[in-house]
Image: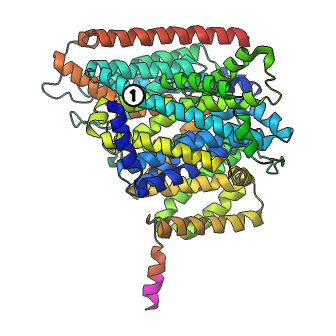
Amino acid sequence: MSELSEAHAQDNRRPAPVGDRIAGAILLVLAVAAWWHSHSFVTGFMQPVGPGAFPRLVTIPMAVLALYLIVRPGFNERWPDRAGLARQLAVVVLLVVYASLLEPLGFVPVSMVGAVLLIRLFGAHWRQALLAGVGLSIGLYLLFEHALGIPLPDMPWLELIGQGGR
Amino acid sequence: METLGFLAHGFAVAMQPEYLLLALIGCTVGTLIGALPGLGPVNGVALMIPLAFNFNLEPTAALILLVSVYYGCMYGGRISSIVLNIPGDEPAMMTTLDGYPMALKGRGGEALGLSAVASFVGATLATIGLTLFAPLLVEVAIKFGPAEYFALFLLAFVTIGGVTSGSLAKSFVAACLGLLLGTVGIDPVSSVPRFTFGTYEMYDGIDFIVALVGLFAISECLVFLEVRRDTSKAHVQLGSAWPGMRASLPCAGTIGRGSLIGFISGVLPGAGASLGSFLAYMLEKRWLGSKGDFGNGDPRGVAAPEAGNNAAAGGALIPMLSLGIPGSGTTAILLALLLSMNITPGPLLFEQHPDMVWGLVAALFIGNLMLLVLNVPLVGLFARMLQAPSWFLMPMVVLIAFVGVYSLNNSPFDLYMMLAFGVLGYVLRKLEIPTVPVVLGLLLGGQMEFNLRRAMSISGGEWSILVNSGISVGIYVFAATLLMAGLVYSLLLRRRLA
């Protein structure tokens, strides 16, 4: 966020002691843990600077700045309301499931279901979502697999069915 | 004179049909991405990088494609500013102030035509500046040793935090986080695995392309989900863009001043296009005084910021190409592309790959001309595409991100990593911790550490080598000055807000 958009987004910002303090605490723990863990990196023979030195060099200002964030918290953008948060959570879960099913089931069927649900979550009606989702996934499949030559995950179960039939 | 010879050679490279086609594709896609509200140059270029990889483009071709997208985005951002009063990307914010009032008065076409000319002049002047100044900077930079480079990287972090962010502490803590994440993986010097926790997927470190797509494209989608948006958009009568061409003549002075200011703020590392358009607008407003009617649809209020942000985009390429220090989020991504193709930007780039550097510069001149042609007669077409609803655009972005990142290594692990960075990017944005320093840290950390260790092995473990040369001391002094200026500035800002 630069100072230009700040002026525009004035009503969208809140003094946020809690958010910044939590962030500061997490960053502080991260810095201390990284500092501690970096001592386990073995420095090789004839190396004036070992593998642990640079990470340690970074964690010092990081810890100081994280402390500053805890002591002097600043502004946050407004966090989303409960409905927004639920939509975001649903999308993240959907995308994790989508990523995990891509290889076992193949790009086309998983993307069709994924795209329809995704479009629905972005606020379209069911009918729009069905049409657009199916169109989008088939369009992208044709574009990438056939026009651009980027291989996408196949449908292994199609072959299994084919073999079973034979 | 020598430069002219190189440039002529560059045109010979860039005029090859394959490169011309890539530039045309890049300009068109870039204008579209820039025009769509919410998607700016950073997301656009981040999204295109995995695709460029998957085509197996050679570095020159990939660079021409992506830089065309970058320039195209800068042109495209103005379209939704003028037509919808929504900036297509952050640098186009100032264009809404006079562009939308012009559109309301039925002069939208004129505003689009005028801003296309202003963009063209700004970008072309900046590209001329790039041609002239980058070789000069290279001559200085060729004397740099590892200690000087270490200082230069530090300078990059100071400037990116000092000039563009609201809170200095937040942007520095973001840079530290990025640097720390950059050390994950096998240490290239000692082959010791660091912060991998035994998972072999982490041995290669965090792929910054995966991180980039997550931090920018995925987090943008999460921002979009916050509120249900009204998908019906107001229709504004546009009219022809041609009168804008004629209207640009009386604005010549404005365009020239805007270009100069934009170019300077683009060259400064960390300042970037948003500052360029902001300063160009504010200074032009002050320059004209009561002669201007800014905020009510003054054509000069459209010309100044558009010249400014396009000039800044060109200027930002100078430190990226000649020093290997990116000045903005988008140039950081371009740097990432080069690094992952085993090409290190910096002074040696000009010696080792002159074809690439000068071919790119020539491609920028050609691309600008293409963009002007695309943006005057076809602007109505682009404006109509803005009517596509966001419930379709955002899922499309997500799917393209998935396809692009998956096919980098054919690995679902990269997809999980991308999603994790998407959530991280979103949370950081909400906390007003800027994400660009994280990317810079992730990107430059390896080089920074490498130069530190080389300096230390030259000196035999003596830390004083870091401040042993005039150049590096000069860089530290410059960094400290900028830091102080940033502190004073944020104090002033806080006082004004209070």
Q: Position of residue A7 (x, y in %)?
A: 72, 23
Instruction: State the residue lying farthest toward the right.
Output: B105
Q: Quadrant of residue B197?
A: top left
Magenta region includes residue A165: yes
Query: Which residue sits at x=50%, y=23%?
Result: B160
Magenta region includes residue B490: no
Query: Which residue sits at x=82%, y=34%?
Result: B101
Left/right placement of residue A10 relative to residue B426 reads right
Q: Position of residue A69 (x, y in %)?
A: 56, 18
User: Visible in this render: residue B420?
Assistant: no
Tag 1 residue? B134
Span shown in magenta: A161-166
The front one of B22 and A91 is B22
Disc 1 marks which amino acid? Ala
User: Visible in this render: residue B305?
Assistant: yes
Q: Position of residue B238 (x, y in %)?
A: 80, 47
Query: Which residue sits at x=48%, y=19%?
Result: B159
Query: Which residue sits at x=53%, y=25%?
Result: B263
Alpha-carbon neighbours of circle 1 within 10 Å: few (<14), some, or many (≥20)?
many
The front one of B72 and B207 is B72
